[in-house]
Image: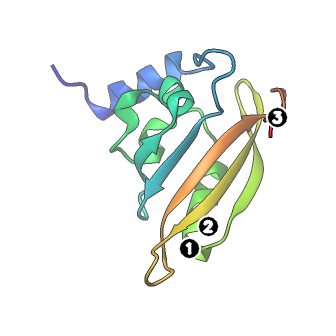
Amino acid sequence: MTEDVGEIGRRAAAGARSTAPPGTPRPAGLCVGAGHRLVHGNPAFLAEFGREAIGLPAREVMLGLPPETFALLDAVLAQGRPLARWIRRDDGEWRLTAMPRLDPETQEPYGVAFHLRAKAGPPVVRDL
C-alpha cells in the first residue's frame, strides 16, 4: 500500500525531531527547480524528514519549518548566490544555510543545496 503525500508529511512532522544518532551530520539536502523537488538528503535529513521525502517538493515534506525557510530557498534560486538566516522551529533556533547549484555550461542556477544547524548544538570541528 502506498502512502499519500499528506500521510508522509504528517509522519515526518510527528516523528522527525532529532532521531539521528549522536555525531550524525546535520540535516542537509539538495533540491531542484522552482518547486524545490528534493533529490538528495544526507542520513540526518532522511532521519528528520523520512526517505519518502526524496522526489517530493520540499514544502510538502519539510513540515515544522517556517515559511522563511522556503523564501530563502526561493531567493537563492532566483539570485544565484548563497544566503543564510536563523529560523525558529518548535525545538529551538536553527541556522539555515543555502547555496545555489549552477549549470556548468550556462552558470544558471538549477537547484539549491542547504543544511540546518541547531543553535544549541555543538560546533562542527574536524581534524585536519
Spatial distance from mark 1 to mark 2, Cα to Cα?
A: 5 Å
Picture coordinates of residue 96 (x, y %)? Answer: 70, 47
Instruction: Single out the mark in the foreground, 2 or 3.
Output: 3
Circle 3 sits on which residue? 125
Q: Quadrant of the C terminus?
A: top right
**SS state under label 1:** helix
* Image quadrant assignment for residue 64: top right
Q: Quadrant of the N terminus?
A: top left
* Image quadrant assignment for residue 19: top right
On screen, residue 124 versus residue 104, left or right, reads: right
Callout 1: few (<14), some (14-19), or many (20+) C-alpha neighbours within 10 Å? some
Circle 2 sits on which residue? 75
- Of the image marks 2 and 3, the number of the one nearer the N terminus: 2
Name the amino acid, label 3.
Val
On screen, residue 17 versus residue 105, left or right, reads: right
Picture coordinates of residue 58 (x, y %)? Answer: 46, 46
Spatial distance from mark 2 to mark 3, Cα to Cα?
A: 29 Å
Instruction: Single out the mark in the foreground, 1 or 3.
Output: 3
On screen, residue 18 versus residue 106, left or right, reads: right
Picture coordinates of residue 101 (x, y %)? Answer: 52, 65
